[in-house]
Image: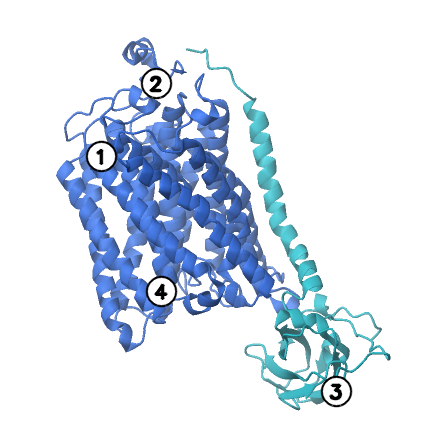
Chain colours: A cyan, B blue
Amino acid sequence: MNQQQPKRQDNSRVITRLLASVMIMFAFGFALVPLYEKFCEITGFNGRTSSKAATADSGMQVDQSRVITVEFHTRVSRGVPWEFRPEVRSLRLHPGEVKTVNFYVENKTNRDVVAQALPSVAPGEASLFLNKTECFCFENQPLAAGETAVMPMQFYLDPDLPDHVHRLTLSYMMYDLTEQARPRTARVERSE
Amino acid sequence: MSTVVTDTHSAHDAHDHHDHKPTGIKRWLFTTNHKDIGTMYLWFSFLMFLVGGSMALMIRAELFQPGMQLVDPHFFNQMTTMHGVIMVFGAVMPAFVGLANWMIPLMIGAPDMALPRMNNWSFWILPFAFLILLSSFLMPGGAPAFGWTFYAPLSTTYSTDSTALFVFSMHIMGMSSIMGAINVIVTIMNMRAPGMTYMKMPLFVWTWFITAFLLIAVMPVLAGVVTMVLTDKYFGTFFFDAAGGGDPVLFQHLFWFFGHPEVYIMILPSFGIVSAIIPAFARKPLFGYASMVYATASIAGLSFLVWAHHMFTTGMPTFASLFFMYMTMLIAVPTGVKVFNWVTTMWRGAMTFETPMLFAIAFVVLFTIGGLSGIMLAITPVDYQYHDTYFVVAHFHYVLVSGAVFSIMAAAYYWLPKWSGVMYDDFLSKLHFWASLISVNILFFPMHFVGLAGMPRRIPDYALQFADINAIVSVGGFLFGFSQLIFLAVVVKAALKKGEPAPAKPWEGAEGLEWTVPSPAPYHTFDVPPQVK
């Protein structure tokens, strides 16, 4: 009865390989996080705009034939008593035209905070064509208790914006980052 | 698959010392016997089926009428969450592992699973996982209430501390599943009887083989996701929180990368069961054996390329939507091959309608209905209408309850004579079948309409125009729930050996090595491997 059928492969070899697969898939789950981030950066999949200032090309042609509506949307994260709003709800512009929009923020609390606004563009594919030459979202916004600030944002739409995009929404969510010293998204190239 | 086996009785006598086993609780705690472990898995999954089912009945009781009657919304959310988690990880998956433990060694002519001690461990950590999960009801804030899909930020920012228990229990369930999968793969690769080539294996073995690879591929990803939820909630990471550079949509990508293969993990073994039962009662060999194997493998492969069809409404570029829509629809092709093969097997067969066959035929019909509503959901533009409505609830309950659960019941009736040594009570089993078949359709079919009309899922209250349909659905729910007690009665009766003694092969047209051993299957089988021709 000890005569087992001949084994095709050593059990331990199969087990080792399977355990290695488990480890690889566990690591793969975590590897998906940076892969996704990179993927979004290239494709604009999640609608996040670049955190770096763009430089408008002086030779850029303004496309007079198209008019795009850009809507602005602002929110503060839950339970944070600030006011945060754009000076206009929407504007219409030609691709290639540079515009500036001011955003107002008021810290209604009695403590100093550090705020960070994060942009998001819908539809996501348009995020690759919305270029900001200047934006408050590139860095943290320290706000003293009760302070009011006017924050400019200068941008243009790349004339290569896909033809089917006629309207896009630029949304800002303001977060309270007082607790976190240096968040990842606040990494800016320019010196502070 | 004709086989020659050494006379099992004389082999049994010669090796009588093998039947010595500890008695009482020790037998079950320390057992390494695949039949004991299979039995424990099956009883455990049935217990969890009743626990998860009671939660479903609480949901249906609250939804019987519009307005808030019995529970508060937070408790309602705990019920939907725990119902889902328990049914997926506690009822359906362990039931399949139990069937695999019992049947795979018997079907391939092996004396036991390849890794019996790990087998013991992979079962015994499971009750602790569910004890941890269920104990979260006693915590302040109650059990998890974020849905079985535990989307961030519901499970991170807005959850109670029961999340930690949820995460740890998920880790343990994952470990158990991975160990079970490793055991199945090693057993199938290394323990087949001489002559049992891969393309001679019964389809239940084949489908489990492929399922085990799916488990190895995606359970570690689930472990990673729950770990990220844990660290986001307690250790200041920002995987899914935009404030720190993360992305909540990433959670959905990671979760469904696990989640979609997971739904096939819960259906592929069903295909194997039905492919064993239909030929037995149609008295014809299975039509298109090889195409069944390839179709199963294709479904498994495609399952990795369709995850984002759960996420159409998160906003996706047109190209991505179309890709996931077409890939999803492509799955209908191998699935269609399977349904075609089952129907063709029955075509002009000498069919009889014993209870396993009734459940198998009901599986084919009702699973196909669930598959067709799946194709409707795959169409991106209409998914915007169906997303998160009761149409989705109807869809996945058709494939999971009248699909996976019906196939498990078919398997239980089919192999119960082999496990217990007695025939089940025929009248009660038929009563169970007809009660289940009628009530499951009263329960889930009207959900399609109420979903198309716009009733969202996971809500404790609803608009008045949905009242009548919800009342009907709730009645169906209670009928279906209590019908399962008949099943319990049948199984208990058989387990107590009350019934006619079963012959080694109780089904005239059945094929396979499991019918060459006596009923009930002796504690040790195939000490001497059979020769498969």
Mark earlier in primary sequence (2, 4): 2
Which tag is nearer the camera, tag 2 or tag 4? 2
Q: Residue furthest right?
A: A58
Residue with the mark numbered 3: A100
Q: Nearer the viewer, residue A94 or B407?
A: A94
The reply to the same-chain question for discs 1 and 3 is no
Residue with the mark numbered 1: B351
| Amino acid type of the residue tagged 4 in the rendering | Tyr
Mark 1 to mark 4 CA distance (whole Å):
37 Å
- What is the secondary structure assignment of the residue under circle 4? helix
Q: Quadrant of residue B468?
A: bottom left
Within-10-Å neighbours for mark 2: few <14, some 14–19, many 20+: few
Mark earlier in primary sequence (2, 1): 2
Mark 1 to mark 3 CA distance (whole Å):
78 Å
Q: Which mark is residue B390?
A: 4
Mark earlier in primary sequence (1, 4): 1
* Residue B343, horizontal then vertical, whole percent: 32, 40
Within-10-Å neighbours for mark 1: few <14, some 14–19, many 20+: some
The residue sitting at 43% across, 60% down in the picture is B377
Question: Mark 2 belongs to which subunit?
Answer: B
Q: Nearer the viewer, residue B389 or B323?
A: B323
Q: Is residue B84 above or below residue B2?
A: below
The residue sitting at 38% across, 65% down in the picture is B77
Which tag is nearer the camera, tag 2 or tag 1? 1
Mark 2 to mark 3 CA distance (whole Å):
82 Å
The residue sitting at 20% across, 37% down in the picture is B353
- What is the secondary structure assignment of the residue under circle 3? strand
* Residue B226, horizontal then vertical, whole percent: 53, 54
The quarter in which the C terminus of chain A is drawn is bottom right
| Amino acid type of the residue tagged 2 in the rendering | Ser
